[in-house]
Image (spheres, rainbow, N blue to C red):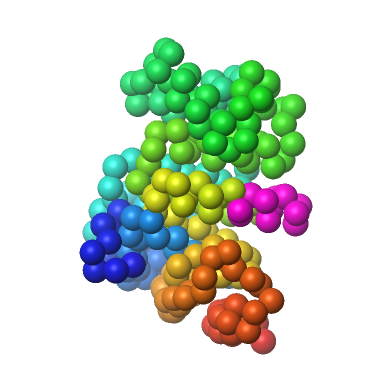
């Protein structure tokens, strides 16, 4: 992120407790418009809690949170309403923001076309494959044109080939719309392949901020990719 880049999210000195257990410790984080930041760490390190703070879903914390507009969230499970068509699922977020009728449906149709689901708009979610359901989830998150997209292990339940396809789709959508992204992932290769910066979270504190200065699309077999991957794995205690 350059000094001229607009900041879409900032956390300053965030602490959070669950009872007597401190899960976030003085977290500082910034995300610029058009920047992808990946967050990696062991299970229980607080990754999803940071995402919930940014999303406004967790408010009982100390410190400062500033987020541009209304962030959109997509989870590992698509969480589509089975009683609504794909089109109705995607337009739902606009309905809650007061956009209804044909305007909401037209926006949903355009976003479904973008994610390659234009021909699935009238089907029920349970008829979709895993990859298609995750595309619908992305469409629902993006239909409101957010400044910030928060992704919590969005491709973790997909098979390897579908996961690579979804990563490429995400980069394509990001390149067209230039929203900021926070990607929570357990997959270090995914973090390096997608992000401009990778943050390592350990016991609720950000212990490392690694820039990924590699051209896109990224070849995972290069020495540069391997060097960053090895550095991150070492910080996570994997040798």
The vertical placement of 220 against 179, above or below, is below
The vertical placement of 166 against 93, above or below, is below
Residue that appears at 27% across and 61% down: 5
Dividing the picture into quadrants, the one containing residue 14 is bottom left
Q: In which quarter of the image is the N terminus?
A: bottom left
Q: Is residue 164 visible in the rendered structure shown here? A: yes
Q: Where is residue 229 in the image (x, y as percent from the top left)?
A: 60, 78
Magenta segment, which residues?
A: 157-168
Dominant SS in magenta: helix
Residue 227 falls left or right of residue 97? right
Residue 59 falls left or right of residue 88? left
The vertical placement of 2 against 157, above or below, is below
Dividing the picture into quadrants, the one containing residue 50 is bottom left
Q: Quadrant of the C terminus?
A: bottom right
Q: Magenta stretch: residue 72 in it?
A: no
The vertical placement of 84 against 90, above or below, is above
Q: Where is residue 117 in the image (x, y as percent from the top left)?
A: 63, 31
Q: Is residue 18 visible in the rendered structure shown here? A: no
Residue that appears at 53% across and 50% down: 172
Q: Pick whichever, 12 or 181, lies toward us.
A: 181
Residue that appears at 72% across and 31% down: 128
């Amino acid at each position: 992120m350059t000094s001229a880049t607009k900041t879409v999210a900032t956390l300053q000195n965030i602490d959070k407790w669950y009872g007597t257990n401190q899960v976030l410790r003085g977290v500082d984080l910034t995300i610029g418009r058009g920047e992808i930041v990946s967050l990696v760490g062991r299970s229980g390190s607080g990754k999803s809690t940071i995402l919930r703070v940014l999303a406004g879903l967790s408010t009982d914390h100390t410190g400062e949170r500033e987020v541009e507009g209304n962030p959109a969230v997509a989870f590992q499970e698509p969480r589509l309403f089975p009683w609504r068509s794909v089109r109705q699922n995607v337009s739902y977020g606009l309905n809650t923001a007061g956009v209804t009728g044909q305007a909401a449906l037209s926006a949903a149709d355009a976003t479904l076309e973008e994610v390659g689901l234009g021909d699935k708009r009238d089907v029920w979610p349970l008829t979709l494959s895993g990859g298609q359901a995750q595309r619908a989830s992305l469409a629902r998150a993006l239909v409101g044109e957010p400044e910030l997209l928060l992704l919590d292990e969005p491709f973790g339940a997909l098979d390897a080939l579908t996961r690579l396809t979804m990563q490429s789709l995400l980069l394509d959508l990001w390149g067209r719309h230039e929203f900021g992204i926070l990607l929570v992932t357990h997959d270090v290769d995914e973090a390096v392949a997608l992000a401009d910066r990778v943050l390592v979270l350990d016991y609720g504190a950000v212990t490392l901020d690694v820039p990924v200065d590699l051209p896109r699309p990224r070849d995972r077999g290069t020495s540069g990719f391997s060097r960053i991957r090895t550095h991150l794995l070492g910080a996570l205690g994997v040798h």
